[in-house]
Each structure stands twice: as C-alpha cells, then as structure tokens.
Amino acid sequence: MSFYKILALSLLPALAFGQAGLEEDAPALCYTTENYAASYDIYSWNARNSIISDKLAEGEFHGQVEAPEGSVLTSIKLSPESSEELPIFINENYNRSMLEHLFIVIHGKRRDGDHYWKIMNDAIMDAKDEGFYKSERQVAVISPQFYSTVYNSGAYSEKQLAWGDLNAWQSGGTATHPTETTTSSFDALDYLISGFTDSLQYPKLTNITVVGHGGGGQLAQRYAAVGKDFSEHVHIRYIHGDPSSCAYFTTDRPILTDTGGVQAVCQYNNTWRYGFDKFDGEHPEKTPQEYFKQYITRDVVSLVGYEDTSSTGDESCMARAQGGRRRRDRNLTWYRYINMLAGTDEDLTGFPGEFQDITDWSQIANNRSSLRLVIVKDAEHNMKELLRNENARSALFEDKDVKIGWRPTRSPDMTE
C-alpha cells in the first residue's frame, strides 16, 4: 500500500461562530505582568482566554467547511506506523506522475482551509492565463485543515488531528485529538512534505512551496526555522505572509516609540512562540543559533502588505514588543533584525525598528542571509491582494530570482 493513501471523508457541518477581536483603534500599550491571569498558558494560546482581555485577540469564527469547485476534502495517513490522519483540501484531479510543483497553503486564524485553497488555486490559474513565467508547470494545491476541538466538534473523525486550543497549531503545538497523540502541526507538515518527496510516487516533482498568511504565516515562519530537512532533489521554499509575530532567536527587541523610546519588557518576551525559551521541538538539543542558521540558509520569503496596519490579531505585549501596533512594522522590523543579527550589508534605510547593542551572530551567518523580502505596496491584510502582485507571483513561481519591488524611504511611521 502506498505511503500516501488518500482516504475520502464525510464531514459533518461545522458550527459557525461570530468573530471576536480588538477594536481597530485600540491604544498602543505595552502590557506588564499585572495583565496576565495566573492560569494563562502561553504555550497553547487557550481558546477561552486572552492575554489582554476577555475577548480573543485571535478570531473564533469558523463557518461550514466545504470543498471548493475543483478540489476534494480528503484525509492523508501521516505515517505507516500511525493511524492518525490530517484533513486536507487538494485538487480533485491531478496526475501524480506528472506533478512538478506542489503548493501547500496554510489557512489563517479562522481555520478556513477551503477559502485558502481557492485563493491559491485562483492565483495560479490567473498567472497561467496571463502567461507568467514558470506557471505553465503541472501543479497541485494542498491546504491542511487544522481543526479546533473547542469550535469544530463533530467536524473531524476519530482518526483526524484536532487541537484543544484555538490557535495552538500556529506555533507548532501538539494536537489533543486523537487521545494520547504526540503529533504537532510541525510534525504534520514534516509528514506531508516527506510523502511528496518520494521520487517513486512523484517522479517529476521538483518544487514544493509552503505558503502561510496571517495565522498560517506564523506557522510558516516558525516552520522555516525548525522544520526538518528533506531530499535535495526537491527544492523547498517557505513564504510567510503578514504574521502577527515571529519567533525571535535572541532576547533582542526593537526600541519602540510608543513606549517612550525604550525596549518593551514582557514576562514572556522570549518564551516560545515569541522566542526560543522552553521550545521543545523535534530536536530540543539544537540551539537557537542552529535554528537561526537553518532559517537564513533556507529559501525563505517574507511577504508583507504595506497597508496591513490595523490592530487586529495578536496584540499581546510580546507581539507589540516586536515592532509596535502594526503587523506591517513588526514584519519590516523582523527583516531588519535578521540582517543585523547576521551582519549583512543589506541597505536597511527607512526600515522601522532600532536595536541597541544587538547580538552579533555574523560569524554564524558568514555575513549573509538568504531571507528575501517582498513588499506589496497596496495590499492590506489580505492574501488575495498580495498574490495579485507581480513580485509576489515571482516568489510563487520563480526558481531563483525573486523580484523585491518597492522599498521604504522614511522612518518610523513608514509614510510616503
């Protein structure tokens, strides 16, 4: 039996819930330890609690999941030794023997894999129709479905993975269903990619591109740093778009103007998902320096919407400490941070974020970083808008060169 046996599913309709979140004009505050409940679990990001209020900073909404036209909602068995399965959306008809490029698109905080499958598939079809270079390849799109046991009860089978905390999957958290599972969302991606790198099953596959946006961008960013290595005959690219936070490799944080020009200090500033303290991944013996080297030597693209300036999403002290209220500024600060940490000669003129006495890992990096930044000038927090852009298309389809496009010219508010 093939390692990759695709099993058809019959899913019950998921319950729909209203979205809860912060108001867009929420004040730019830095929260201290007094704002945290003693029972708060930073690792799981519990579905019923938030760091800063009794409303979720990350949305709860989850409508009925249905396969878009051209796709099927199926399930893959993760390994021969386990009965556990990962639900996915995938092209209804694709030729395994002819497949050349696989896109794995990770949904956002609303866990709407159907929506993200359609966005990615439409972006590919539009690029094909317009004759964009390299988009003529034989492609398939997979969108994993990370269910919540709190809000999706009845939607998943007894063998399928689900997470007991709303967005624990974003940071590589371990599933809580099936009972006694030890599989994390990182493990699920490892298994998924490993199956497709089997050259006997997929003889013409040369490229796999992992794309995540928002909550999915959080998972993609962290997975780019800590995910396993794969067969060299398949090239892996990681694209993280507009995450609310990234996993910092050191305790360095930028000086923020909304805290009076001082570095924000938070109780969990360097605890995993925001840093590497207490990270217990597949290789806990690895150091942050080793994960940093993995991240900067892999093919990683940071995709940023210039107009992604609202205060929805993760508004915790730890997230704001990474660059303030705006997701855009946090992600542009991340690019500055990585290049300064690596000691590159990248021109960072106009980028937000000021670091004092930043850690020097230039010897580890040899003063180089493979991280590339694509800024989409007119895009808000919207993956569809991002992928319409020519430079974002370049990140999707070009093998080597990625068009970087626009760069900032002013700081710190990034206005023209």
Image: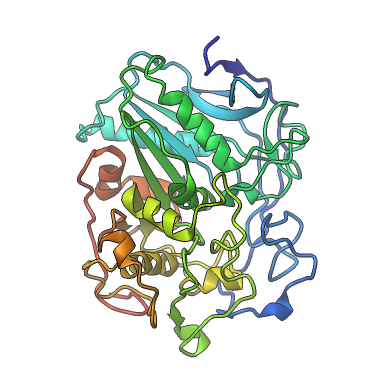
Q: Is residue 407 left or right of residue 205?
A: left
x%, y% of residue 295? 39, 52
Say which residue appears at 20% left-offset and 46% top-offset. Answer: 401
| Residue at the image point whose x is 28% and y is 35% from the top | 127
Quadrant of res 164: top right
Does any portion of residue 68 appear in the rendered image?
Answer: no
Q: Is residue 17 above or below residue 46?
A: above
Tell me residue 205's x, y (percent): 33, 23
User: Does 284 appear above or below 28?
Assistant: above
- Image check: 7 left or right of 94? right
The residue located at (57%, 38%) in the rendering is: 187
Residue 96 visible from this viewpoint = yes
Front-most of residues 50 and 159:
159
Quadrant that contains the N terminus: top right
Q: In this view, does 1 lie to the left or right of 15?
A: left
Q: Which colour scheme is used?
A: rainbow
Q: Which residue is most to the top?
A: 1
